[in-house]
Amino acid sequence: MSEKIIEILDREELKVASLTKRIISMTVDDFLISFLIVIAFYDQFKMVKSYEEMIILTDKLFFFIFLAYTLYHWLFIALYGKTLGKMIVKIRCIDVNTLDNPSLFKALIRSIVRNFDEMFFYLGMLYAVVDPLNRAFHDLISGCVVIEEKE
């Protein structure tokens, strides 16, 4: 299947995004969302006095954190094909069948699976190291690939 996708991308003169750009993009997005969560719950975060209290608070806020990450990735990928982190490094996510932004459904699936990847130490993202298209598990499940932006 990868060979067919590679052939289509070559025909359309699309280049797969590098792992380095994907890691930078992911880091920017994670810092941004984390910053927004801290701002949104600032009153609760400023009361934290120990590591244990921080664990308890993040556990208490788990639903909101999961929701924020899901909505951010879902809407940005569905509407623009890229998050703010991807915009900075000039890469985008496309549906391998349409070569356009993923549908709302595919972007939602990608976002949810990505969040579970993060919860389990980014294990699903390790797949990108061995995949010829640098796809993480969430890309594979949703039928997407991340490419370089055309200049």
Image (cartoon, grey):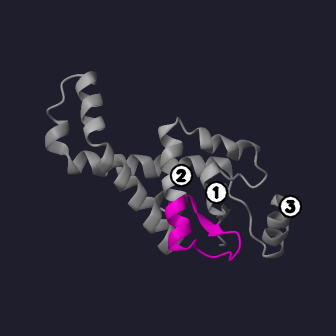
Instruction: Out of 135 and 59, give the one closest to the viewer.
Output: 59
Residue labelled with disc 1: 141
Q: Nearer the viewer, mark 3 or mark 2?
A: 2
Q: Which of marks 3 and 1 is in front?
A: 1
Q: Is residue 151 left or right of residue 40?
A: right
| Disc 1 secondary structure class | helix
Residue labelled with disc 2: 113
Q: Visible in this render: residue 71?
A: yes
Q: Visible in this render: residue 82?
A: no
Which numbered tag is attached to residue 3?
3
Give the mark, 3 or 2, whose residue is nearer the N terminus: 3
| Disc 2 secondary structure class | helix
Q: Position of residue 140 (x, y in %)?
A: 67, 56
Label 3 crowd bin: few (<14), some (14–19), many (20+), radius 10 Å: few
Magenta segment: 88-109
Quadrant in which residue 5 is drawn: bottom right
Give the mark, 3 or 1, whose residue is nearer the N terminus: 3
| Disc 3 secondary structure class | helix
CA gap, disc 3 and disc 2? 24 Å
Q: Where is residue 28 in the image (x, y as percent from the top left)?
A: 46, 50
Give the mark, 2 or 1, whose residue is nearer the N terminus: 2
When the figure is inspected, residue 105 is found, relative to residue 42, above or below; the finding is below
When the figure is inspected, residue 25 is found, relative to residue 58, above or below; the finding is below
Name the amino acid, label 2. Val
CA gap, disc 2 and disc 1? 8 Å
Marks 2 and 1 close (CB-CB < 8 Å): yes
Name the amino acid, label 3. Glu
When the figure is inspected, residue 90 is found, relative to residue 125, above or below; the finding is below
